[in-house]
């Protein structure tokens, strides 16, 4: 059974940094896309960044130049390095993975990790 386990959230002051990790299991799980989404109470879950199996990255405009998504293939772990954090970045961050099999897409989500940025 596929599992995505996030870690690394916490409380940080504005201008600070955090690195989120998402460990995927089993080791044979190789998604086409890894991504990070975030959600604040009462709002929809929004895309933050994606990383394809071909190493193509995509970021929402509000985090470009501050956040970096990367992957350690040996550990089957994806990271989100977040620098110069701002109060508007406060949210629950979710790891996401997408696979395809016989023409169908399958989505997987982690449990979420809270990021709180104080001003």
Image: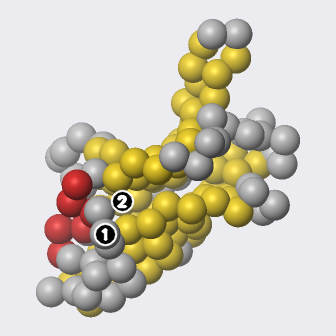
Image quadrant occupied by the N terminus = top right
Q: Residues within 10 Å of mark 2 (few under 14, many from 20)?
A: some
Pinpoint residue 82: horizontal percent, then vertical percent: 39, 74
The residue at the point 57 percent across, 33 percent down is 98
For the C terminus, the image quarter is bottom left
Q: Nearer the viewer, residue 36 or 53?
A: 53
Q: Position of residue 19 (x, y in %)?
A: 49, 75
Residue visible at 24% across and 41% down in the picture: 44
- 101 sits left or right of 14 in the view: right
Towards the viewer: 96 or 54: 54
Residue at position x 84%, y 41% from top?
28
Of pointers 1 and 2, the one earlier in the residue sequence: 1
Residue 19 in sight here:
yes
Q: Secondary structure at mark 2?
A: strand
Residue 16 located left or right of residue 110:
left
> In the image, is 61 to the left or to the right of 108?
left
| Disc 2 target residue | 92
Residue count near mark 1 (Cα–Cα under 10 Å), binned few <14, some 14–19, many ≥20:
few
Q: State if disc 2 and disc 1 touch (CB < 8 Å).
A: no
**Which SS class for mark 1?**
loop
Q: Position of residue 80 (x, y in %)?
A: 49, 66
Q: Is residue 97 visible?
A: no
Give the label on residue 65, or none.
1
Disc 1 versus disc 2: nearer the observer: 1
Q: Residue 56 bears which disc, if any?
A: none
């Amino acid at each position: 059974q596929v599992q995505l386990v996030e870690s690394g959230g916490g409380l940080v002051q504005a201008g600070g940094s955090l690195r989120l990790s998402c460990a995927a299991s089993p080791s044979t799980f190789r998604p086409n896309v890894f991504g990070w989404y975030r959600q604040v109470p009462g709002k929809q879950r929004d895309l933050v960044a994606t990383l394809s199996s071909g190493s193509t990255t995509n970021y929402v405009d509000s985090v470009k130049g501050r956040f970096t998504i990367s992957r350690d293939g040996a550990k089957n772990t994806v990271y989100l390095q977040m620098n110069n954090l701002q109060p508007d970045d406060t949210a629950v961050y979710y790891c996401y993975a997408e696979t395809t099999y016989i023409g169908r897409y399958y989505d997987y989500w982690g449990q979420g990790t809270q990021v709180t940025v104080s001003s």
